[in-house]
Image (cartoon, helix red, strand yellow):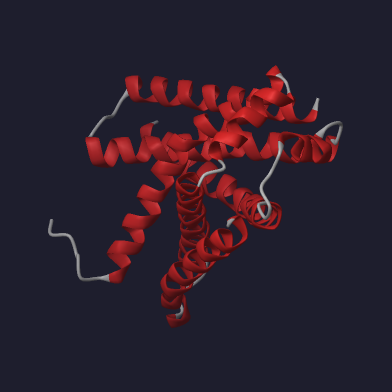
Amino acid sequence: MKASLTMKLWLIQRLSGMLLGLFVVIHLVTMIVTIQGGVTAREMLDHTSGNWLVGAFYSVFAIAAAVHGSIGLRTVAQEVVGWRGGSLNVVIGGFCILLSVLGLSAVKGLVL
Amino acid sequence: MRANYDKKEYWASFAQRWSGVVLALFLPAHFMVLSLSLQGEQALDGFLHWADTPLVKIAEAGLVVLLTIHLLGGFRILLIEFLSWGEWQSWMITVTAGGAFACGCLFLLRAF
């Protein structure tokens, strides 16, 4: 059972990592291009408000980052601190939900 | 177990792990700042104005470096895990370090 969960999380970590690889390249290029001359809220919102493509992109991006980051933190907690078992899974699950909600709330603020 | 401090693979693994931890712990703050737009343009502009200082820009460049390390280092891990080993893969550590340094410099050049 434990090995099966570890295997599933390993696979989800790799698949979300592949997806994030593509998203992060786009995010890095966007950041480096737009940072020149400073960024104002108006400039950001002009590009994002009502743009459903941006909304969909960043929604998937935020959830993939939440899942990938949470699984990574779980592994580090196990290997570095030696924290294992149900309590770790509950805390990591809570962190993943918190990150997803915060990420989607950020997308809502920028797109809607 | 003795750590191989003199091996570049040890430091690649170290950088991959801890860049991921820093990025995962940074994400809630990142999402909360972007969510400020829910309170209106002025709230987000207030933060962007505060962030428009050399120290914050240098910190942001640090995050760009960590993100690029994690991106290229993650790509290296996928190559190792999903392809058969080729000596050329050992170059990925150099590519990761060089790419992260280049992205950080590019960000700083555009930010200032």
Query: Which residue is painted at 52% across and 65% down in the image?
Result: B105
Please tell me whether residue B55 is drawn above or below residue B34 in the rendered image. below
Q: Quadrant of the N terminus of chain A?
A: top left
Position above or below: B33 against A19: above
Can the viewer see residue A3?
no
Quadrant in which residue A78 is drawn? top left
- Judged from this view, the residue extending furthest toward the bottom is B87
Task: Specify the quadrant of the image occupied by residue A106.
Answer: top right
B102 above or below A38?
A: below
In the image, residue B14 sits, relative to residue A39, either above or below, namely below
Can residue B30 be seen here? The reply is: yes
Q: Nearer the viewer, residue B112 or B24?
A: B112
Tell me if A5 is positioned left or right of A79 in this view. right
Q: Count up the numbered dots.
A: 0
Residue lying furthest left in this view?
Answer: B2
Q: Position of residue A12 (x, y in %)?
A: 54, 42
Give how far across and how far down residue B99 sits, in percent: 51, 68
Q: Which quadrant of the rendered structure holds the C terminus of chain A?
A: top right
Residue plotted at (44% across, 77% down): B91
Q: Nearer the viewer, residue A17 or B81?
A: A17
Q: Nearer the viewer, residue B108 or B95?
A: B108
Task: Find residue A85 and report its image quarter.
Answer: top left
